Amino acid sequence: MMIIIAEFFVVILKVLWAFVTAGAKWVVRPKEKSVAGQVCVITGAGSGLGRLFAKEFARRRAILVLWDINSQSNEETAEMVRQIYHEIDTPITKDGPVGGVEEVPPFQPQVYTYACDVGKRESVYSTAEKMRREVGNVDILINNAGVVSGHHLLECPDELIERTMVVNCHALFWTTKAFLPKMLELNHGHIVTVASSLGLFSTAGVEDYCASKFGAIGFHESLSHELKASEKDGINMTLVCPYLVETGMFKGVRIRKEIEPFLPPLKPEFCVKQAMRAILTDQPMICTPRIVYMVNFMKSILPFEAIVCMYRFLGADKCMYPFLAQRKEAMNNNDANNGI
């Protein structure tokens, strides 16, 4: 009994110390680690946040491996990365053997592109195997690919629901199974899950998307605990949960107009820069903006009816409806045009 009590007090001290260290990081910004020369795989790299992640890692001289279902947009991202490589391609000087200075050829990072549908397990595994032969082992995995159906539940075809679940959630299992074994062997790596604030708290009209992002966060957290239980301290995990981002994915989403100036959609560049800071300092989780942390906490302690009242006040209860209406109108127009 005394042993249990002693261990309990040790746990309390460790918890308090965790609070102290976390608070210190808010005051003193941790030093960012170098990713130069490390192989970084980014899924959904052809547009949106994936493209911005590629550009940020390119500026830090990482070797980029870009996956996307759209080969053309993926190549466009690769060309942007090559341009960044060219801009930072400057010689480095170091002290010579006899006191002089000699010029060292700069490290030449490369970018590789692969057409891959992460919604298909066989495509993920075959692409991963091909990539390993051509590039080598993966140091950083950015699970970024995502889709949204844009339909009310009862109007959404089953195929689109399945597609949302497979791309946003199931694909994480397959990419991780493809690259984690070597990370475990080397005790080195970093896995990033780009989820959403809608994986922490939900709203009406996007049941499939919320379910997929809740699943993605559950997968990420469970894997994080498994790595801790395995004492693989060389493998880091970062969960990225942004609020609405202006990528066009949720075009038309509106909250109450009086509240909107205080909670505007996030600029993609700001979102990625915040995420990069978290990744490069091995931060376990990043919510953008910080009010998302508070909302998630309040959701955990408030009665459901209180949450509903808050949603209605903010206009968050039906914020997706304009977006869903736009998607429905666009589909009807496409059907009409195809019928002409």
Image (cartoon, helix red, strand yellow):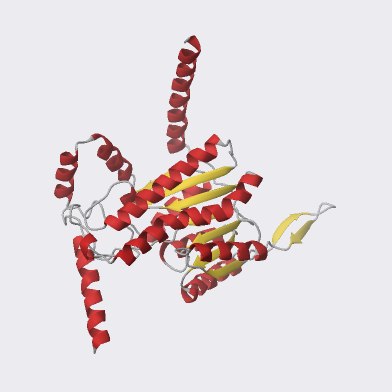
Q: Residue at x 48, y 9 (%)?
A: 2
Q: Residue furthest top?
A: 2
Q: Classify residue 297 by image quadrant.
A: top left
Indicate whether 144 appears above or below 248: above
Q: Residue at x 48, y 51 (%)?
A: 192
Q: Tell me where residue 221 appears, x and y as whole percent.
A: 44, 42
Q: Tell me where residue 26 appears, x and y as whole percent.
A: 43, 37
How many numbered marks does the figure carry? 0
Any part of residue 29 in sight: no
Q: Residue furthest front?
A: 158
Q: Residue at x 49, y 19 (%)?
A: 10
In the picture, the quarter occupied by the C terminus is: bottom left
Q: Residue at x 50, y 45 (%)?
A: 237
Q: Residue furthest bottom?
A: 340
Any part of residue 202 in sight: yes
Q: Tell me where residue 109 appears, x and y as whole percent.
A: 64, 63
Indicate whether 226 appears above or below 268: above
Q: Nearer the viewer, residue 10 or 61?
A: 10
State left or right for residue 336 relative to residue 212: left
Q: Tell me where residue 27 appears, x and y as whole percent.
A: 44, 36
